[in-house]
Image (cartoon, grey):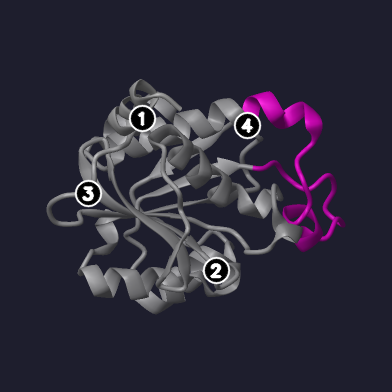
Amino acid sequence: MSIFDVFKQIESREPAPTGTLEYIIVGLGNPGSEYDSTRHNIGFMTVDTLCERYGLQCKKVRFKSLTCDAMIAGKRCLIMKPTTYMNKSGEAVTEAMSFYKIPPERTIIVFDDISLEPGNLRIRRKGSDGGHNGIKNIIYLSGSDAFPRIKMGVGAKPNPEYNLADWVLGRFKKEDGEKLEKCFDNAVSALELMVNGKIDEAMNKFNS
C-alpha cells in the first residue's frame, strides 16, 4: 500500500464522535448465525446497512448489545444490536437509555412488521407494541410507548394456520432481495432525517 492509499483511507473515515450523545438507534433481532437474514432480524440488517454507509463496525459489546458510537448526519448516536434475544430487547435498550439519560423520544427502534409487504416501511412517532414481543418488552421495562420507530415489512403469513414463529424466523424469498435493498437504503435515509428532528419529512418521504 502506497502512502497515498494510506492518506485516502484516513480521509474517508467517519470523524470520531464529538459532543453529547443525542440519539440511540436500535435494530432488533436475535443473535447467532442460525438467525442471520431471517425476517425477525430485519432490524439488524437495517443497522448493518447504516454501518456500511458510514464505514462503521458495530462490534463493541456494551449494554447487552453489539454497539458503536458514531456521528450520523452530524448527530452523535449510539447504534445497537441487542444480543438478549428478541423477547428481552428492553433489557438492552433501557440500560443504554439510563446510562446516557436518553428519553424514549430520542430512542429510535427498527423492527419487523408482518402487516407490511417486503420492500415497504412505515415510520411512527410512537404507538403500541402491535403484538411484537421485542417492542412489548421495551415498553414494559421503560414504562413508555413514545419511541419513534421504523417498521420494516416482512410480509404476512401465507395462511392463518401457519405458525407465526416459523414465519418470522424463516428467511426471505429470493425475489424479495432487490426490494429489500431499496428498503434498507430508504430506512437509513429516514434515520438521517429523524436524528435531525425531521420525522415528519421522513414519514412523508418514505412511508408506504
Please provide the residue range marked out in magenta.
154-179
Q: Which of 16 and 199 is in front in this view?
A: 16
Give percent across and percent down for residue 79: 38, 54
For label 1, count other residues whose C-alpha is less than 10 Å away and answer few (under 14), some (14-19) or many (20+): few
Residue that numbered label 2 is attached to: 83
Which of discs 3 and 1 lies nearer the camera? The answer is 1
Residue 170 lies in the magenta-colored region: yes
Residue type at mark 2 is Thr
Residue that numbered label 4 is attached to: 180
Q: Residue at x 21, y 43 (%)?
A: 75
Residue that numbered label 3 is attached to: 17
Give percent across and percent down for residue 6: 36, 30
Q: What element carries label 4?
A: helix
Q: Distance between the residues labelled 3 and 4?
A: 29 Å
Which of discs 3 and 2 lies nearer the camera? The answer is 3
Residue that numbered label 1 is attached to: 6
Q: Is mark 1 on a helix, strand or loop?
A: helix
Q: Can residue 19 be seen in this view?
A: yes
Disc 2 and disc 4 in contact, CB within 8 angstroms? no
Give percent across and percent down for residue 184: 53, 34
